[in-house]
Amino acid sequence: MGYGLKDRRVLVTGGTRGIGRATVLAFAEAGARVVTCHRAPGPEAARLADDLERCGDGHRIAQQDVTEPEGAERLLETCRQHLGGLDVLVNNVGVDDHAALEDLGPERWQRMMDHNITSAYLVTRAALPLLADGASVVNIGSAAALRGRPGAAHYGASKAAMIGFTRGLCKDLGPRGIRVNAVAPGVTSDDGGRELPAPVRERLLAATPLGRLCTPGDVADAVLFLAGDASACVSGSTLTVDGGM
């Protein structure tokens, strides 16, 4: 059984860089029609538009801030007008940060929660009328939620909340045949971690049984698996993609 994603209607939030970009392109290459969004203008959106054009017609990139209710509503209106409904929703918007607790003020904490969990709540709630029975929701969490990371309690807390959101939502939407799962990536790199300081890269590689860092494409493959037909009875699960770290 394959993923069966041809002609599926897909929304990926935060789709112009990293994992989001790889996921958008993977869906497009699988024959899906994709809407994605980005928060701020920049060259990444134009580059993604060029790549999507090579994948065929039927894709859209919108500039919206989905940490705000109005932005989420506008994005879903774009989906309604362009796609008519949704078969797959991927909540990928998120930010990273490092701060010791004594340096972690309320505004910094709130920014993390707004991006990493509130955006998923707002988009999913706005998407409910568009989600087809039997649809799939995939939330992008982090392996840091499962093992913690020094100087990042706010990041770990926000990503742990995503796992709880996934578990609760699968119960709410299950009667409609809608599956809800999460992917928890570890450290990802397009370049084998060469952009990291050498001691950091060496420490990460030494802690990874597979001996390499995951790529955004590795994470995108996991998302497509959870979105597609091959995972038809998988719901409420968190799939860790970190090379065994």
Image (tube, rainbow, N blue to C red):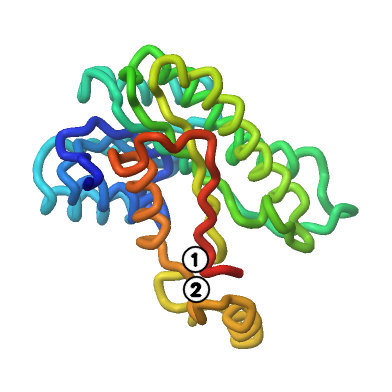
Q: Secondary structure at mark 2?
A: loop
- Pick whichever, 46 or 99, lies toward us: 99
Q: Position of residue 146 (x, y in %)?
A: 68, 53
* Residue occupying the point 41% across, 76% down: 191
Residue on which disc 1 sits: 188
Label 1 close to label 2 by CB (< 8 Å): yes
* Disc on res. 69: none
* Residue occupying the point 40% across, 41% down: 38
How many badges with numbers are in the image?
Answer: 2
Residue 70 in sight: no
Q: Earlier in the sequence, mark 1 or mark 2?
A: 1
Which amino acid is tagged 1?
Thr
Q: Position of residue 114 (x, y in %)?
A: 63, 34
Q: Quadrant of residue 116?
A: top right
How many residues crowd mark 1 within 10 Å: few (<14), some (14–19), many (20+)? many
- Pick whichever, 7 or 19, lies toward us: 7
Residue 87 in sight: yes
Which amino acid is tagged 2?
Leu
In the picture, measured across the screen, residue 222 lies left or right of residue 2, that is right
Q: Quadrant of residue 72?
A: top left
In the picture, measured across the screen, residue 27 lies left or right of residue 179, that is left
Q: Is residue 240 positioned above or below 210 on the image?
A: above
In the picture, measured across the screen, residue 22 lies left or right of residue 96, that is left
Residue on which disc 2 sits: 213
Q: Is residue 71 positioned above or below 41 on the image?
A: above
Q: Is residue 21 positioned above or below 173 on the image?
A: below
* Residue occupying the point 60% across, 87% down: 198
* Residue occupying the point 33% across, 47% down: 224
In the picture, measured across the screen, residue 78 lies left or right of residue 149, that is left
Per the model, the C-alpha gap separating discs 1 and 2 is 6 Å
- Pick whichever, 145 or 74, lies toward us: 145
